[in-house]
Amino acid sequence: MFRYFIRRVFLAAPVLLGVATLVFSLIHLVPGDPAQAMLGEGSAPQDVDELRKSLGLDQPLLTQYVRFLRHALTGDLGVSFRTGQPVTTMILERVPATAELAMAAMFVAIVIAIPLGVVAAVWRGTAVDYAAMTFALAGVSIPNFWLGPLLAIVFAVELGWLPVSGRGSLANLVLPAFSLGLALAAILARMTRASLLDELNELYVRAARARGVSRTASIGSHALRNSMVPLLTIIALQFGAVLTGAVITETIFAWPGIGRLLIQSIGFRDYPMVQGCILLIAVTYVTVNLVTDLMYGVLDPRIRFE
Amino acid sequence: MTLRLEAGQARTGIVIVAIVVIGAVTAPWLLPWDPATQDLPNRLQGPTGQHWFGLDELGRDILARVLLGARISLLVGVVVVGVSSILGMAIGGVSGYYGGRIDQWIGRLMDVLMAFPGMLLAIALVAVLGPSLVNVVLALTVIGWVGYARLVRGQVLRAREFEYVTAARALGAGTPRILIKHVLPSALPPLLVQATLGMAGAILSEAALSFLGLGVQPPTPSWGSMINGGRVHLLDAPHLTIFPGVLLAIVVLGFNFLGDGLRDAIDPRRK
């Protein structure tokens, strides 16, 4: 088990290095001079020189790269061009908001998806299955940047049940969480159905039924439990989609998270902040996948011995 | 009651996609309204017999703009899927067939690109390259090829062990010939499914980037930028947001239906 853990962690290291390299190279992809682009066309040459120096862009590329990696390892992602504050501090201030939104969206998704997927699998090929899967496919197809404003109009403006934007109370969380979680619910429902269908065909479920276990118990206590193992991976993989979706949802609902910070920073051409946000989201995603892999190894011993 | 879900879905998908393609292609000849013509005195006017989808904040015909937006969306989808799938086939084919060091390096590159969730890398690339249609296509292609390459690599790994491939090799066929004539064709059916679903993904991503102000720039209409532009008028003129959104969702649903139907046709166990 320990060897499995070490191997998995070891495998994640080159990926993280690759991610950091790509994020580092982002600023060098800016057409022309990044410092000039950040300050605008009419800026004084000495200001551009000063900014170039403060960003370290006057150094050789290799020096810049090594410095970026060394600083990133110690949590130093530079200083925001817009506010002058450390990028890491500004991002960390936004982490709770994004984490709260992501968790709430995942919760909404799971609560909707698992019953829907189970119902579709149990009544496979019937109108119930058809309706559930059409709903799921529609959920995948409706963009959250369209659903969000519509939900806000109905539930915040017309009905007045929920606040339209901001963060603070549970009521503030409902609309962004639904807007972000619905597409995920759709994907998860499809996966739950597929995973449960695989298990329902297994001999142990038939054996349980033959032993006199009720249909509900054979599904709930036997098949569904086993079908949850692959679902765990899907949920973890979808965490990435939630993080990207949060960029849009946070923008719509003025939710003070990392996604909104990213979009605001793009608008201000605050490249150090853009790099910081992208790096943090990607590293979080890799870490979540790594933890899932490790948990998968705990849940399913076969994985450890592959 | 048993329903033939997948056949119905695929057919619905084909019909939706066909209608949108025909509408987008023939729009300039069908509609009397130019998408750029402004009718400022009647700005924000709701749907009427003359303007079926109403007018936007500058008094432009929304139906004409939505159909022009469909052209942009379909163009992005076709180019992104076309280039990504060709790149993915080439890279995945080489990686799977040769194995060894090449496979390892390509595998690492794919792992790094997959470490960026969803279209985060596309957002990052467009943010630094600057918002434009070309950069959107470029960014979506950079993240898009990986899925195709992984799929093709897996298929090639499997196909390379088949006896007919060994036979071709024994008969003296060169590697490019074996790859193109014998190995890659076996990867085509799942690739077709992925490309169909990829159209939906590319159209959604382009709209999302345009919504964030990172995609197609005004005055060229895009469904994403139209939805964003309509947000400030959600209370007084919701039709600005509703029509582009409905069309976007329908087109994406159409491609998803089609992709799902094709997948079920290829792998009947999934039904």
Image (cartoon, rainbow, N blue to C red):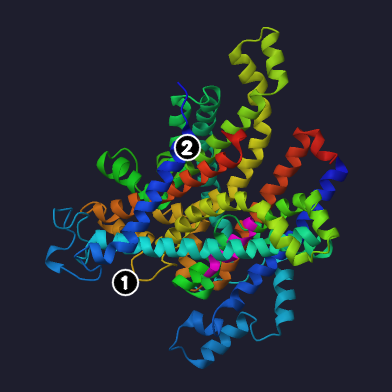
Q: Is residue A102 left or right of residue B154?
A: left
Q: Residue at x 68, y 51 (%)?
A: B186
B85 to B262, vertically: above or below: below
Q: Which mark is nearer the camera, 2 or 1? A: 2
Q: Residue at x 81, y 35 (%)?
A: A302
| Rendering coords of residue A37 (x, y %) | 50, 81
Q: Is residue B32 left or right of residue A296?
A: left
Q: Which portion, as a residue range, is magenta?
A: B138-148
Q: Nearer the viewer, residue B108 or B81?
A: B81
Residue located beneath label 1 in the image: B219
Q: Give the class, few, some or many, for how many residues have Cα within 10 Å of label 2's Cα (few <14, many ≥20).
A: some
Position of the N terminus of chain B by quadrant: top left
For badge 2, the amino acid type reads: Ala
Position of the C terminus of chain B by quadrant: top right
Tag on residue B7? Answer: 2
Q: Is residue A177 visible?
A: yes
Q: Residue at x 62, y 19 (%)?
A: A219
Q: The residue tagged with tag 1: helix, strand or loop?
A: loop
| Rendering coords of residue A210 (x, y %) | 69, 9
